[in-house]
Image (cartoon, helix red, strand yellow):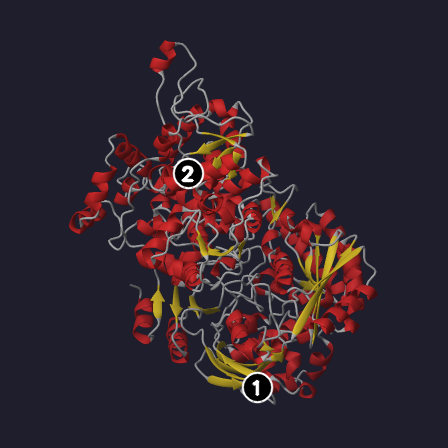
Amino acid sequence: MTDLEAALRRAVRGEVGFDATSRALTTMDASNYRRVPLGVVAPRDADDVAAVLEVCREHGVPVVARGGGTSIAGQATGTGVVLDFTRHMNRLVGLDPEARTAVVQPGLVLDRLQDAAAPHGLRFGPDPSTHSRCTLGGMIGNNACGSHSVAWGTTADSVRELSVLTARGRRLRLGQEWAGAPEGLRDLVDGDLARLRTGFPDLPRRISGYALDALLPERGADVARSFCGSEGTLGVLTEAVVRLVESPRARALAVLGYADEAGAAEAAAGLLPLGPLTVEGMAVDLVPVSAAALLPRGGAWLFVETGGESGAQARARAEAVVRAADVVDALVVTDPAGQRALWRIREDASGTATRMPGGTSQTESGGGAEAWPGWEDCAVPPARLGAYLRDFRGLLSAHGLRGIPYGHFGDGCIHVRIDFDLLTDAGVARFRRFSEELADLVVAHGGSLSGEHGDGQARAELLPRMYGAETVALFERAKAVWDPDDLLNPGMLVRPAPLDANLRFSVLPRKPVDVAFGYPSDGGDFSAAVRRCVGVAKCRTASVPGAGVMCPSFRATGEEEHSTRGRARLLHEMLAGELVTDGWRSSEVRDALDLCLSCKGCRSDCPVEVDMATYKAEFLHHHYAGRRRPAAHYAMGWLPVWLRWAARVRAAPVVNALASVRPLAAVAKRLGGIAGEREVPRLAGETFSRWWRGRGGRPAEGGDLVVLWPDTFTEHLSPSVGRAAVRVLEAAGLRVALPPTLRGRAVIGDGTSRSAAPLLSLLAARRGRVCCGLTYVSTGQLDRARAVMRRTLDLMAPVLETSAPVVVLEPSCAAALRTDLPELLHDDPRAARLASRVLTFAEALERHAPDWTPPAVNLPAVGQTHCHQHAVLGDTADRRLRASAGLTGELSGGCCGLAGNFGFESGHYEVSAACAEDQLLPAVREAPEGAVVLADGFSCRTQLEQLAGVRGRHLAEVLAQGLE
């Protein structure tokens, strides 16, 4: 233990982390930069903060304050001690509806404040797109703005008083009329009044530099306002009194379509006199294909929100905006759910923009060129935005770069991710040249280098181009007044590090890492896959809207280590080899991945489609290569083998009887690495395939042929689902068959088909069962998974020669066949062919029996969309099928928490139960009387039964019962 660590442990009551994991989690924010801290402290209160500052001052170690870690300019990283306010100093201290103020701690997430203010008709004005995870302290540090700044301004406009600790331990209460000003600050201002009155651009989004002009006497000498945007370099915030604004009772959203972004940009300023709440812009490049249908015609759009006392008034104002705008097409949305869906398109842009289709990036692949921040939010006067964008596009072309601008058009503030090559010396040199020329262009248009996210390391070096050397020297003097020892976040704003130093990619291996999966969207490069995480931290949300899933383990634990971003950071450091030094054998990475449910929620919900389930399987494959695995990997990873053997010797009654004897079950669970709190599921007395053979095992005549996949769970644990599916599919006029069980030329149809080859071939053939390999993949036994998958492809050869679809009832197995199979057997073209044939139960009915009318069930339905269905398969067909059957109500999002083997493994029970309590169990408890509890996944049904005593049913079972 170092002297610094020991001193901090003695001085503070909060957690002190100098271990590799704690440090690795804070090496980066959402920027291009990386710094390795000495340690991390989670202070419990202001006294802890004061103690940390005292210890660090004595040791000459810098201190960096950190909130949600979503900063885009590098200012939330540092080489000293990082203060993490999100763990303890995250409370809403008080809210006064009459005064319209709130008292907050720096680690409070913005959405928590909004939730508390909403019942009073109030809200905090600024709302960045990261509102579900950014903190008030970080917003004050960066002077964040968000989409409503045209109505309610920046964070500085919403701050009344700030409680601050200086680096030397002074406790100040900052406010107007010099309240809380450190000694020497007023003299500094009085000595340079002319410069402060003339040297700062007048525009709504000037965030760059220190806001010293807020200290002018005619502006109320507002010390609190001048502190906003100082990026943790002047003092450490411990509490804030913020202003709240009245929230409109009703809102409407006008989406205006334009031919291109320049047209949208030129129109934005003209809409401001109409008093909109937002004027946001984005181009077609950033719109996912799945979301394009939600937008009106056009190549770029303005999102203009209006408010009113009533829905009619808000709509009337939105329609007035449409009439005033010269548009290609327009849409006015008053439905709150519809508005949320449209806003999600805009809010996800910061992540979506990091993968651009096509392009010339050095990492171009099937997933598109990588694009990065760095020039994320320049701002110019709104009236000059169109001209600036044309010049900006010209500069990009001159440097052979591409970027997709979007952002706060009404404030003249543009966000953009650019396909910089930050992996080679030549690319980094071009990054520098472009940055210098763009800074000059912004200044020529009367703009600010930063319009929202601060300067950090990305832009601080270029501040002399905007302000001139003398004003920057004034900034340095101001910093010395507040922090004479340069203890707080050094290298930011004044005396900055070069903009091309400390790039986070420089530590990654230059050669591709040898891996098992194909990573088709990343050119087969595991490093590129890990680079996908840019740190916007959508995975750190405390609640998931709608049917979202990501990230259940973070919501259960609240720990960064158990978020998708945290795991990606640890994998990044594993590849870097500086902090995490033992590569694939890393215990730090293993422990962080241990609570990953492999739900695949991040594959769909993360804006850049990080697929942590795949990364986890890859890591476990390497981590345990040539080593003994945990018992659960053998007990549950090889579950298909054990269940087949039990069925072969007809041991289900014996196994069930033994499992009901608690002492025997306890021993078996302990030996198998299974959580003691879990009940062992009962084996079916008759497997699905045996039932199929008993009914004749031949497809009926007429209708399309569909091959029903006998997954392990349906086959051995819930054959009633398979029986119900057969009944419904046949009632819909389809011919149902099971896959062959003999390799070679086999007749499709009965699951025990005989080879059509000569007798010798028949004798030489090997009997087998198809299997998606899911349990082997989820436990990282990828060699075994590949062998199982290749055997399956051999068995499925006759099916692949037909046009028959493959209907998979278990969503996790369907997802494995759709994604894991082609990505793991990327060298076998049969894998992609089989993946393309996979349909869910609802998809099969919709595509192959479109004229069939399901039975009228006419009941309310509750439950949860399976996480793999949400992430990989989609549930559009299921929604339509439920509606046709009269099943009303929405299914919840999230993950059931059992997640295959995860919830059964020893040590996972509490997290598993907490995940179920997030959305699934409350939805079931609140279900109306007589509601059908839908759960297509075996894990979901098991979790419901074991935690709530409720029987969930597959949609096929519900429809089959309706046929009666």
Quarter location, residue 218? bottom right
Q: Is residue 472 above or below residue 462?
A: below
Q: Label 1, label 2: how many angstroms apart (C-alpha)?
A: 69 Å
Q: Residues within 10 Å of mark 1 (few under 14, many from 20)?
A: many
| Amino acid type at image mark 1 | Gly
**Of residues 270 and 935, which is closer to you in this image?**
935
| Amino acid type at image mark 2 | Gly
Coordinates of residue 283 in the picture (x, y in percent): 71, 53
Q: Secondary structure at mark 2?
A: helix
Coordinates of residue 823 in the picture (x, y in percent): 48, 36
**Of residues 880 and 128, which is closer to you in this image?**
880
**Of residues 8 and 152, which is closer to you in this image?**
152
Examine the rendering and report whether any part of residue 893 can be seen.
no
Quarter location, residue 177? bottom right
Q: Secondary structure at mark 1?
A: loop
Q: Residue at x 63, y 86 (%)?
A: 221
User: What's the mark number on residue 722?
Assistant: 2
Decide if residue 851 is on the left or right side of residue 238: right
Examine the rendering and report whether any part of residue 708 can be seen.
yes
Decide if residue 626 is on the left or right side of residue 728: left
Decide if residue 780 is on the left or right side of residue 163: left
User: What's the mark number on residue 175?
Assistant: 1
Q: Is residue 951 above or below residue 637?
A: below
Please identify, in this view, whether the residue under mark 1 or under mark 2 is nearer the observer: 2
- In the picture, which quadrant includes the N terminus? bottom left
Coordinates of residue 525 in the picture (x, y in percent): 50, 39
